[in-house]
Image: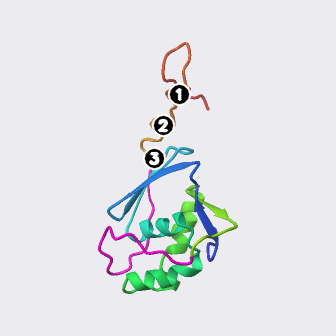
Amino acid sequence: MTKTNHLNLEINSGGISFERLDGEVVIISFETGKYFNSNNSAADIFHLIENGVPQISWSGIFSSYFTGFNDTDSGIEEFLSMAIEEKLLLITDTSQLNHIDLPNDYLRKEWVKPALVVFDDLADLLLIDPIHDTSTSGWPTQKNE
């Protein structure tokens, strides 16, 4: 597991697409064909990373939004390690902001450890490139591994 304390992170914008709606983030990896679901605290972490807020500021932000937030047992490191391993996040040298407000798209109460739910049931379909994967046998064709 990657040690993530105080790393500067950024979203792998060249390898994924994501959308946030009502406190939930749905992420699709173009590299693996997997798609992911993260909600509530995990979606908030993604929001902070997207906006360049360094990890050192997260504890104060989460403490002001959630009751029962405990920095030492928050589950953030496990979540970030998994997101880095799945190539959703990249380690970078810089961060931008010190503080940002979290979106007001769901009711925050008790802190719940962030989770990254992985789905790979559509990976074969998501990895097909119907525009470029053409051949004399038809369209689309799957790449041979």
Question: Residue at left 47%, top 41%?
Answer: 123
**Magenta stretch encompasses residue 113:** yes
Q: Is residue 19 visible?
A: yes
CB of mark 1 within 8 Å of CB of mark 2?
yes
Toward the left, the furthest residue is: 107
Residue pictured at 55% horizontal, 25% vertical: 133
Q: Residue at x 52, y 63 (%)?
A: 50
Camera-nearest residue between 94 and 39: 94
Q: Amino acid at mark 1?
A: Gln
Image location (x, y in percent) of residue 54: 59, 74
Which numbered tag is attached to residue 124? 2
Q: Is residue 87 above or below residue 136?
A: below
* Quarter occupied by the C terminus: top right
Q: Find disc 1 in the rendering and name its residue.
A: 142
Q: Which mark is residue 120?
A: 3
SS of the residue at dot 1?
loop
How dense is the environment of label 1, judged by Cα within 10 Å: few (below 14), some, or many (20 and up)?
some
Magenta: main secondary structure equals loop
Q: Amino acid at mark 2?
A: Asp
Measured Cα–Cα span from mark 1 to mark 2: 8 Å
User: What span is in magenta?
Assistant: 98-119
Alpha-carbon span between mark 3 and mark 2: 8 Å
Q: Is residue 138 magenta?
A: no
Q: Tell me where residue 27 appears, x and y as whole percent.
A: 45, 53
Viewer-proximal residue among 124 and 26: 26
Q: Is residue 21 left or right of residue 72?
A: left
